[in-house]
Amino acid sequence: DAGVIQSPRHEVTEMGQEVTLRCKPISGHNSLFWYRQTMMRGLELLIYFNNNVPIDDSGMPEDRFSAKMPNASFSTLKIQPSEPRDSAVYFCASSLGLTKETQYFGPGTRLLVL
Amino acid sequence: GESVGLHLPTLSVQEGDNSIINCAYSNSASDYFIWYKQESGKGPQFIIDIRSNMDKRQGQRVTVLLNKTVKHLSLQIAATQPGDSAVYFCAENEHNYGQNFVFGPGTRLSVLP
């Protein structure tokens, strides 16, 4: 079975550039989550969707970050403009439902902003 | 320059011994907990979960204990193997708070040959 798929796996960009991270959740899952992991702050929830609708975006750090889920099988997390402090590993996860379901994580995108 | 970041607690155990990884949570309203394992370069992987109406739950080689009185969670791994080397996170979810899990800082488990 295919798990959560993320692309790219690694991204190196320069400050000021736009970065788009992509995620394909597990088929049949209707909740999707974006996390950021850094040494300083650990694993943080940025935003999550249920049935393609954003439910909680309180973790999104600032307006430079935006996320979309145009359909049940695809989501993007965009950073524009990117800054060095955005360097982190970004994980996408999906789950079956909205209440207390196990989340299945993708392999992550390692982002380095120079 | 050197970056200052989270200093992960590290637990070193001999192969074949039992491991106990601890987690303190702060929200007394949390009623669902998950342990995740994260290997280097990979995403967190579900190990076991427990709801607040239980004190103990067992899986294959793993046991989770929940002490709500002191807000403490532990993960016990029996007969620790080299493949168990990873960072282990506990995650808590508050009652009626949807899927918003809060993750702990993690503990690095190192299995010695």
Image: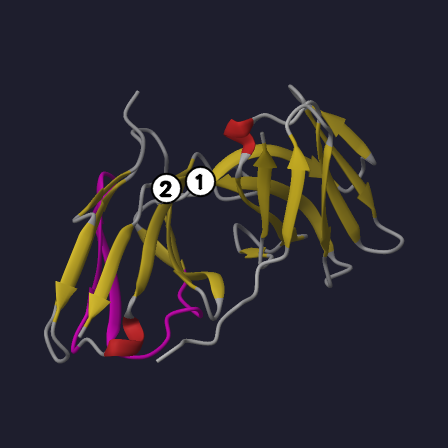
Disc 1 element: loop
Q: Which image quadrant: the N terminus of chain A?
A: top left
- Residue A6 spot, x, y in % from top left: 23, 44
Q: Which image quadrant: the C terminus of chain A?
A: bottom left
**Residue flagged by tag 1: what amino acid is it?**
Glu
- Asked if residue A97 lies left or right of residue B108, the reply is left
Residue sitting at 40 percent across and 66 percent down? A57
Q: Taking B8 as reference, is A59 above or below it? A: below
Q: Taking A4 as reference, is A41 above or below it? A: below
Q: Chain of mark 1?
A: B
**Residue flagged by tag 2: what amino acid is it?**
Lys
* Contact? badges 2 and 1 (CB < 8 Å): yes
- Residue A81 spot, x, y in % from top left: 16, 78
- Residue A88 spot, x, y in % from top left: 32, 63
Q: What residue occupies the far front of the structure in this picture?
A: B113
Residue sitting at 37 percent across and 75 percent down? A61
- Residue A98 spot, x, y in % from top left: 49, 44
Residue sitting at 37 percent across and 70 percent down? A60
Disc 2 element: loop
- Counting other residues with Cα less than 10 Å from the Cα at mark 1, is it few (<14), some (14-19), or many (20 or more)? some
In this orientation, which residue lies closer to the viewer: B72 or A54?
A: B72
The residue that mark 1 highlights is B39
- Asked if residue A16 lies left or right of residue B60, the reply is left
Q: Taking B65 as reference, is A78 above or below it? A: below
Color style of the picture = secondary structure
Q: Chain of mark 2?
A: B
The residue that mark 2 highlights is B42
Which range is magenta? Answer: A56-81
Occupied quadrant, residue B64: top right
Give me the disc on residue B78: none
Q: Is residue B42 one of those drawn in magenta?
A: no
- Asked if residue B84 lies left or right of residue A2, the reply is right
